[in-house]
Amino acid sequence: MNMLRSRARRGVMAALVVTLHAGLQAAFVAVAPRLPLDAGAIALAAASALVMLVAAAALWTLALRAVARGTLLTLFIVGLVVGASAVVAPVALPVVVALASPLIAVGSPSTAAAIARRHPWRTLAWVIVTAVAVVLATIVAMLLGLLSPGAPGAALAWVLIGVGAVGLIGAWVRWAGARTSPGPAQP
């Protein structure tokens, strides 16, 4: 039996991914050098981004149950775009993540556009919810960094953010399932 078919196993594996990711991010915080532009700090930031991309890919894979090569390629390209956005224009990050989510959920821009045309209000609502969630995740991370600095605060922040990500990924997977729903299109 395929391990990804059981909902309970996928839930346990998602919890494991979130916990492992939070632990790794907390470890990066614990060993981070004091100077932010130190070569070690830049290397840790790159490692942190890579770990985040791997965790996101794992959560999407668990939610989608089976991932085609095209979806993995889309996820990789989107990961690069999100990473570049975080460096070049951090203020655009919530919008970039929100617009990238439907692409990852279906694995193709044309399919995402078709679903968005069929369900425009649902699509718009989830794009807005995703963008707001990214902003709230940033605020949570900053507040926990202020109130509980160091590795424990980072671990708690990443667990909370990971739980939110699991919920959003599930919502986008359900949105992607709308392409096969027999119901009428929204006005």
Image (cartoon, grey):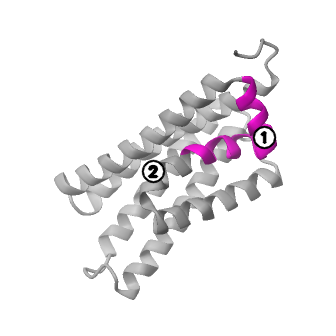
Q: What element carries label 1?
A: loop
Indicate which disc residue 99 carries: none
Queried whether the magenta region covers residue 107, the answer comes back as yes
109 relative to 100 in the view: left or right: right
The magenta segment: 98-118
- Compute the Cα span from label 1 to label 2: 23 Å
Q: Quick check: 49 above or below 145?
A: below
In magenta segment, residue 73:
no
Q: Which residue is drawn at 63% across and 53% down?
A: 57
**Spot occupied by residue 179 in the image (x, y as percentages of width and height):** 78, 27
The residue labelled by disc 2 is 19
How many neighbours does mark 1 have within 10 angstroms: few (below 14), some (14-19), or many (20 or more)?
few
Q: How many labels does the image show?
A: 2
Q: Residue at x 74, y 34 (%)?
A: 5
* Position in image of residue 131 (x %, y %): 48, 41
User: What secondary structure predominates along the stretch shown in magenta?
Assistant: helix
- Viewer-nearest of labels 1 and 2? 2
* Image x and y of residue 89, in percent: 46, 63
Residue 156 visible in image: no
Q: Nearer the viewer, residue 147 or 116?
A: 116
Q: Name the residue under label 1.
A: 2
On screen, residue 91 versus residue 149, left or right, reads: right
Q: In which quarter of the image is residue 132?
A: top left
Identified by mark 1, the residue type is Asn
Q: Earlier in the sequence, mark 1 or mark 2?
A: 1
Picture coordinates of residue 106 (x, y %)? 75, 40
Q: Is mark 2 on a helix, strand or loop?
A: helix
Disc 1, disc 2: CB below 8 Å?
no
